[in-house]
Image (tube, helix red, strand yellow):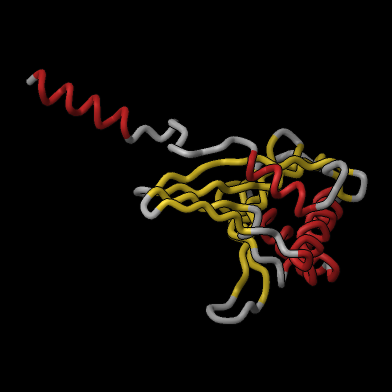
Amino acid sequence: MTVITTLRQKLFELFRADRAPSGYRPGVTLAHLRRDLGLATLEVDGVAFEIVERTESQLLMHLVLTECVLRVPAAAGGAGSFEVHHGGAIRRSGIHVRRRAGNQALGRELQARLQADSVLFQALMPLDFKRLRIELHDQQWCVRLEHMGGSEVVNRMPAFRRYIALSAEQRVHLLATLAGLRRVLSGL
């Protein structure tokens, strides 16, 4: 019985989710992304945003992913959690909002505003994002945008490390999207 318990404890320690992956260099991917953005300060239309880094461990490799986080005061109270994604199986055909929690009417209003703002829509359509979450809590909107670029792949066998840069074109779309989201959410 003690051998099984010890073995289980060792396996738990080996595969703990909160443990940093082997070879992870905190802040290095953030520095690369800051260079790609080319901004002295992380601001869009005078509103500051932040970039956070997180890791995803997989067998013999890990990913270092970055998220742009934008906080916008909400015009009204309430709570909700929404995911934004591109529509279309092969070609992007639009922007869709999926409600995760909260008021269904708020999700429909968010969808309508994202599509009605032509500048934001034009920036979102070519933007290569992996995740775009928008949450409302305590009269504040929190946008978390994870772009495909600005990330790093680290493999142990064979050993390699590759940073996926944010292109100049994607940089323009990313900053325009953050500015547009700030504009749309500040009135909602």
Vertical placement of residue 136 versus 126, above or below: above
Say whether residue 75 is visible. Answer: no
Say whether residue 26 is visible. Answer: yes
Q: Is residue 65 left or right of residue 178?
A: left
Residue sitting at the far top: 2
Q: Where in the figure is residue 36, as x and y percent of width and height?
A: 75, 54
Q: Where in the figure is residue 148, as x and y percent of width and height?
A: 61, 60
Q: Residue at x 24, y 27 (%)?
A: 10
**Viewer-closest of 41 and 26:** 26
Vertical placement of residue 185 versus 129, above or below: above
Q: Residue at x 86, y 41 (%)?
A: 41
Q: Is residue 108 left or right of residue 58?
A: right
Quarter residue 99 falls in: bottom right
Q: Residue at x 81, y 57 (%)?
A: 175
**Viewer-closest of 181 and 40:** 40
Quarter residue 50 falls in: top right
Quarter residue 2 falls in: top left
Vertical placement of residue 90 versus 131, above or below: below
Residue sitting at the far bottom: 91
Quadrant into which the N terminus falls: top left
Q: Where in the figure is residue 119, as x and y percent of width and height?
A: 85, 68
Q: Where in the figure is residue 74, as x and y percent of width and height?
A: 80, 42
Q: Residue at x 81, y 69 (%)?
A: 116
